Image: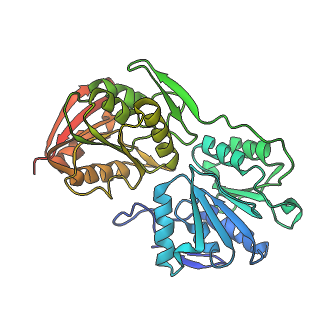
Amino acid sequence: MPILETPFARLDLIRQPEQANEPLQAFDAADEYLLAHLHEQALPADARVLVLNDGFGALAASLAPHVRVTSNGDSHLAHLALQKNLARNGLPSDSVTFVPGSQDVSGPFDFVLVRVPKTLALLEEQLIRLHAQLAPGAQLAPGAQVVAAAMIKHLPRAAGDLLEKYIGPVQASLAVKKARLLFATPVDKPAPVSPYPTRYRLDEPRLELLNHANLFCREGLDIGTRAFLPHLPQSLGDLRVADLGCGNGVLGIVYALHNPQAQLTLVDESYMAVQSAQENWQAIHGDRPVDIRAGDGLAEQPPASLDLVLCNPPFHQQQVIGDFLAWRMFTQAKAALSKGGELWIVGNRHLGYHHKLKRLFGNVEQVGATPKFVILKATRTA
C-alpha cells in the first residue's frame, strides 16, 4: 500500500470501502501539493483549520498532530476512512472533530482547505455556509487564505468562479504533478442566500420531493428510478423493507404509500441524502415509524433481518467509475435478507447486473424493462 509522506507525517492510509488488492490509493498529488504549501506557511500550533471533502482523511490525519482540525464532508464512507486511518496511524480518535455535511460547522477558522468535490452544488453550499466563519482579520495574516485543491482533470473553471463569488479574489498556482491549488483571499461580502434545497414534483404518485445540495439528480427524478417506480411490489403486508442507497427517499416513500403495513429502513452514505429523505418522509408520511440513517450500506444490518431490499445502485465513488460499490451493496443485501427474501434493483442494460446477481443469488428474473434499463428481482433461496 502506498505511503503518504509529507513534512507533517508519514501515513499508511486505506480507502473505504476496502477492497482486496485495492488498485487505488487513499491520497493523490493534490493532497501532497496542498500539504506542502501549508508546511511553507509555518502554521502556528493554535491554528484552527477546517478541511472540506477530505476523501479518506489524508489531510486531516496529516495535520491532526500539529493544529486544531475540523473535518466537514458529506460522505459517511469518508468519515469511516478518517476514523480507521487515525487508528491505523496511532492517532487519537478525538484529534479531529468531524461534522457531517448536513450540519453547519462552527468557527471561526484561520485556514480553510477544500478538496473540490465532484458535485459543484455541494461546493457552493459549503462556501455559503462558510460565510462569516473565517477568523476576524484572518485575511491579513500570512497565508491565511482559503485554499482549494484538485487534480487538474477534476477542476472545472466553475469551481474558481464559486470561490471568487462567495469568498474573494482567486489566484491559481502552477501545476505540479497534474494538480493545482486555488488561493481565495476572503473579503467582506453580503451574506449570501442559499439556492438549496431544491424541489421537484412527481406526476405519479403526485408528490413534491426536497433535495439538498449533494443529491444525485437534484433537479428532477433520475430516469432509472422513473423506470423502477411502476414496478415496485405492492400489497405485500407487514414486510421488513430497506431502500438501499436511498437518496431523497423516493423508492422507500412511494413503496410505503402502497404498502401501509410495511416497516421501512432507508440508508445512504450521503448525510445530505439522509437529511433529504428524513424531511421528505416527514412531509409525506408524518409520524409513521421509519429508520432513516447514514451508513455503509447494509453493513450494520443484522443478518436475515429483511424481507425486501429496493436499490438503484450507484456506478461511481467520487470521480471513480465502476461497479464495485454496486457489487458490495448486492452482497450486503443477500446477507441482510431472510430465506425467500428479495432484492429488487434497476440498472442500465449494459452493466450486466443480471449475470452478477445470478452468480450471487442463483435465482434472478427480469420483472420490467425499458430500452435503457432493466428491473431485476433476485431471491435468496438459502
From the viewer's side, name the closer residue of 328 and 205: 205
Answer with the quarter of the image where residue 198 lies. top right
Q: Is residue 354 left or right of residue 183?
A: left
**Colour scheme:** rainbow
In the image, residue 154 above or below residue 231: below
Residue lying farthest right? 140
From the viewer's side, name the closer residue of 311 and 289: 289
Location of residue 359 in the rendering, given as x and y in whole percent from the top left corner: 18, 49
The residue positioned 58% from the left and 58% from the top of the image is 99
Location of residue 163 in the rendering, given as x and y in whole percent from the top left corner: 75, 47
Which image quadrant: the N terminus? Answer: bottom left
Q: Is residue 77 left or right of residue 58?
A: left
Res 351 seen here: yes
Location of residue 354 in the rendering, given as x and y in whole percent from the top left corner: 23, 39
Location of residue 72 in the rendering, given as x and y in whole percent from the top left corner: 60, 57
From the viewer's side, name the closer residue of 80 and 14: 80
In the image, residue 152 above or below residue 378: below
The residue positioned 73% from the left and 43% from the top of the image is 162
The residue positioned 49% from the left and 72% from the top of the image is 85
Res 25 seen here: no
The residue positioned 43% from the left and 30% from the top of the image is 284
